[in-house]
Image (cartoon, rainbow, N blue to C red):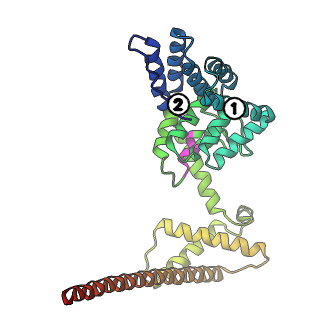
Amino acid sequence: MKIPNRDMGYSDDEKYQEHYDKGSVLFDMDRLEEALEEFDKAIELNPEHAWSFGNRAIVLESQGRFKDALHSVERALILSPDDPDFTATRSAVLKQMKEIEDAAPRTLDLTLLDALRSFDGQKALWAIRVGADPQCIDDDGNTPLHLFYRCPDLPIAEKVARELVHLGADIEAKNHVGDTPWVKLQGIKNSTHKAGLTRILEDLGAKRDDAGLKQKYARMHAKRFSAGTGVQNQRSEGYWDSIRCNAVKKEILQRENIHGVSLDKDRIAMKMSMLIEFDSRMRAQGVVLSTTELIDQLERLEYHKLIYNQGQAIKRDFTKQKIGRIMIGVILSLLLFYLIRRVWIMGG
């Protein structure tokens, strides 16, 4: 809600007007505490200035302090009972107070967590300001600070983090797998604001946890490697012991050498992971394949994927050519129209 900054027509020697104007500017900059101080100073110098009370109410509403906001706006209505803005502010405050009264505390906690999971930073900010527990956790043990990175807007994410810490959130809290908010953030891929979010946490006192980050990457690697049904159990039962793994690696290298392809360690590890995953799924269905059959299946899958990608590339090229022909046709049509028009004008 933007504070109206009206020209009240006061003279220069009225000091309260200076504080009122400064408070309006600070609110527009989202510096709520400083804005509140300026409006308080304006009211102290002129207790009959209705707009100082009205704007003070808007600041308090933005902070989630609805009882104080209601008291302030009602004072503004006493001083200026016909002002529609004060009436609207009072209605908005009463509506939010009723919503909070109707909601159980745990409901507010769930609202906060759901808002963060659904990338709704503004709703998360509202839930924090109206009383959600900054230390509430989801089923995975994540606190709101573990999830604040989901706010798509960096300034909103910073507000969420700062307000949570201000209200007592533990910036070093660990979820069920032992990740702090800093560690969880580092494991996020494709976050456009990852560097900025990391800076926010570190500014608020989060410590770099390289050991925790190493453990997280190890868990992620183990999860990828053991994807599928019961791979770990199969490894322990001897399906994928070191002897078989080495034999499979050797056969993969032999086949690739025949085709003149050189594989690095990462590529071999990826192929092994795909083989183990495929084998686990086959065994879950009661199908046991030999090493050669597994590698044959993998090559077929890679071949079909290659054919699909080539087909998609051809389709894209055809679409580009089609668009190009259409554009050429349009340009030629316009050129022909221009020439016909010129001939007609010259003939006339």
Q: Is residue 209 at all visible to an observer of this figure? A: no
Q: Residue furthest left?
A: 346
Q: Is residue 109 at all visible to an observer of this figure? A: yes
Amino acid type, callout 1? Ser
User: Range of the magenta residues?
Assistant: 182-188
Amino acid type, callout 2? Ile
Measured from the top left, where is residue 165 in percent x and y?
59, 29
Q: Residue at x 77, y 39 (%)?
A: 107
Q: Quadrant of residue 183?
A: top right
Q: Which numbered circle lies on residue 3?
A: 2
Q: CA distance from mark 1 to mark 2?
A: 16 Å
Q: Quadrant of residue 168?
A: top right
Q: Residue at x 45, y 82 (%)?
A: 319
Compared to 145, does 293 lie above or below? below
Residue at disc 1, secondary structure: helix
Binning the other alpha carbons within 10 Å of mark 2 as few (below 14), some (14 to 19) or many (20 upward) gives some
The quarter of the rendered structure image containing the N terminus is top right
Q: Which numbered circle lies on residue 91?
A: 1
Residue at disc 2, secondary structure: loop
Compared to 28, does 152 lie above or below? below
Q: Is residue 100 left or right of residue 3?
A: right
Is residue 63 rendered magenta in the image?
no
Q: Residue furthest front?
A: 348
Q: Residue at x 59, y 83 (%)?
A: 300
The quarter of the rendered structure image containing the C terminus is bottom left
